[in-house]
Image: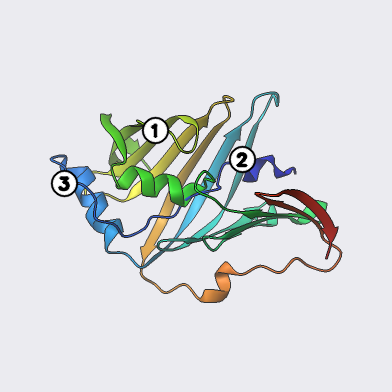
Amino acid sequence: MTLLRFLAPAVLFLAASAAAPTADPTLAKARALYGRAHDLTCVFEQESLWQGIDETVRSRGTLSLRFPERVRLEYDDPDGDLLVADGHLMWTYVRSLKQAVRTELDSTGYHVGRLLLAFLESSAGVTRLGEEKVGGKAAVSYSIRWVENPFRLVDLRLWMTREDGRIVRFEFEDEQGNHTRYVFSKIRFDGGVPDEQFLFTPPPGTDVVSYSAGGAGRGTE
C-alpha cells in the first residue's frame, strides 16, 4: 500500500457558515443540516484511480469530523492506516510501510472537509445535474466550478439525499486526471467525537516525512 491514496482526502471539513441563500430545496436542506452540526461520524468507502497506475485502489473505514477544522479517516481495509488533521497539521500513516507524512496545511491544501466546505459555502457556481439512487435512497447530484480555483481541481461533484440533504457521495478530479470517490453511510450527527481522535503520535521506528512552506524533511520517530 502506498501513500498515494492519502493525497486526495486532504480536506473534508464541513464548517458551520453563513451560506448564501438558494432556491434549490435539497441544497438548502444540506446547508442547514451541516451548518448547525457540531460533529459527524460515518462509514466511508473510497475508490481512487491514479494516472500512471493501471488499477483502482479501493478502501473503507470510519470518518470522524469536528466542524470546522478537524478530520480523522481510520481505515479498516487496509487495517491500521490513518489520516488525521486538526486544521493546522495533517498526518497520513501507512502501517504496512511504517511511514508517516506530516504536512502543514495552508490555504491551498485540500482534504475531504475543505472541499465540502467550499461547496456548501457557495464560493463557486453550483449546477444541479439530476437524480439517482445512492445506497437505495433518492439523491440529487450537483457539480461545482470555482471562479478562482484554490485547490486546482477540474471537477467536484456531490450527491445529497432528497429527503434531508445528507451528503452520501462525493467525487473529485485534479489537474493530473487523478479521480477519487467517497460513498458515505451510517451517518450520525452530534454524537460527540473526543479530542484525542484528532491527535496522532507516530509509533516508534516510523519513517516520518515532513512538508512545510520551507520545504521537505525526513527523520525517524
Which quadrant would the C terminus be assigned to in this image?
Answer: bottom right
Which quadrant would the N terminus be assigned to in this image?
Answer: top right
Residue 146, position in %: x, y?
A: 36, 32
- How far apart are the two marked residues, 3 and 2, measured between alpha carbons? 37 Å
Residue 93, position in %: x, y?
A: 71, 56
Q: Please give the residue where the numbered disc 1 appears in the rendered image.
A: 148
Query: Which-is-in-front pick, marks 3 and 2?
Result: 3
Position of residue 32 relative to residue 147, above or below, is below
Q: Please give the residue where the numbered disc 3 appears in the rendered image.
A: 21
Position of residue 98 relative to residue 48, above or below, is below
**Hey, what amino acid is under mark 1?**
Glu
- Residue at 57% across / 75% down in the picture? 196
Q: Please give the residue where the numbered disc 2 appears in the rendered image.
A: 58
Q: Does label 1 or label 2 sit earlier along the sequence?
A: 2
Per the image, label 3 sits on a secondary structure element best described as: loop
**Hey, what amino acid is under mark 2?**
Arg
Count residues near mark 1 (Cα–Cα under 10 Å), then give few for <14, some for 14-19, many for 20+.
few
Is disc 3 in contact with disc 1, using a CB cutoff of under 8 Å? Answer: no
- Residue at 55% across / 43% down in the picture? 46
Splitting the image into 4 quarters, where does residue 134 fall? top left
